[in-house]
Image (cartoon, rainbow, N blue to C red):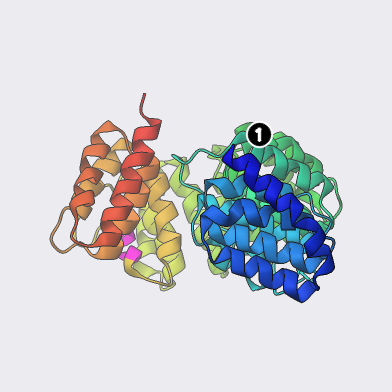
Amino acid sequence: MRLVTILVAAASLLPAWQEASVKERVKGVRDIAKQGPGAIPRIEPYLEDRDSEVRWEAVKAIAELGTQRSLDPLLKAMKDTEAGIQTRAVDGIINFYIPGYLKTGLSGSLKRATSSLKSRFTDTNTTIIEPFVTVKPEVITALGKLVREGTDMDSRANAARAIGILRGRAALNDLYEALRSKNSLLMYESLIAIQKIRDLESGPKIQFVLRDLHDSVQIAAIETTGILRNKAAIPDLRELVERARNVKVQRAVITALAMMPDEQNRPLFLKYFEQKDDGLRAAAAEGLGRLKNMADVPLIERAFESETKMSVRLSLAFAMVMLGRTELSEFSPLQYLVNTLNSRSYQDSAEPLLVEAARDAAVRKALYPAIRQLQSTKEEKIRLARVFGQTGDKETLAVVETLKEDTDAEVAAEGSKAARNIAARLP
């Protein structure tokens, strides 16, 4: 009854809105928003205002209030005819699941509903919800529809980005369709979203994009193929590396092949292991490590001792761990990876390598002391908690539980998240 009363009262105000100036209506939204989340039902009718700037102010306010009751109004705003409003609504939905996203999302720097989104997209797109977070099915459905039918390509691309961030597996068909749009931005964001969802059946469905003429799209397709372990694409990748337009494409191909262990690729890895380009040497080293051919151990060890580039040394350390060097001692390759978690320049490279290595139970157990030792740093504890959160089992759960009692609040929070992620996977 209370909700009906509020809605009737709000509807009775519509004529007054129409008589007021745009400036007055915008001020009205701002004044109502100051009353907090409980005012969302009073702001919602402004989403139907005839002026886009009033609708923009309404969706902006609802997104910033960010409670459970904001989701339905934001889903409504996603149907607006203005791309900026659609984008703000999408970012507001992500913000509900990842608090703080509004500051970094595409709409964060938009000042008006009609502001251009051009050049606001970047390659920095690593945000993703924690595995234990459940997203309402209607949110993913609405995002998939926006990918297909958004006002412009920018709002469609932002919706594709959101699907990846929210792990929207149910919208995969919408992403596949977007790959045929011939719009490079939409195709790129769709590929990154498919990477994040990690449905292995997606591999063959993106294979046709491997020869795209746009560098960023082709490289994203190649990277996604490796992440999805689509071995059916190996012949295509081998052909691409010989005909690559530039070294960036070559790096992507060798990196993708390195993710799909195949002894037939060993001669290729040995060839690129000797290249001057750091990225090619690093990718080849990782490929040799994943092959787990013990004949390569002396080669990898000699290279690790003589290599001067840190990015390549990380890959060589990873290769040695994959080849059985799982001890955690002062100068061991595994300790080198752990130590690098303290480097602002390379910690984001070391962490995923540790995630992959820690999927092996022997490596994971070897890493347990790294968060128990008195000399373990805050960054090591935080990053290892993330590693264990993605790879851990029941035994690991007991290890990360100890982090929840850490005196550092950030470490304790990461320990709690890791425990929830592990628990969500356990039977």
What is the magenta segment's predominant secondary structure? helix
Instruction: Using the image as rendered, state which of residue 203 and residue 198 is in the foreground.
Output: 198
Q: Residues within 10 Å of mark 1 (few under 14, many from 20)?
A: few
| The N terminus, quarter of image | top right
Q: Is residue 288 magenta?
A: no
Residue occupying the point 84% across, 45% down: 180
Q: Residue furthest top?
A: 427
Depth check: 403 or 243 in front?
403
Which residue type carries mark 1? Ala
Quarter location, residue 170: top right
Q: Nearer the viewer, residue 38 or 95?
A: 38
Side (left or right) of 41 relative to 311: right
Provide the residue designation for mark 1: 170
Quadrant position of residue 302: bottom left
The location of residue 212, given as percent across then percent down, is 81, 53
Horizontal and vertical percent for residue 196? 58, 46
Give me the residue at 78% from left, 63% from top: 17
- Which segment did they paint magenta? 334-341
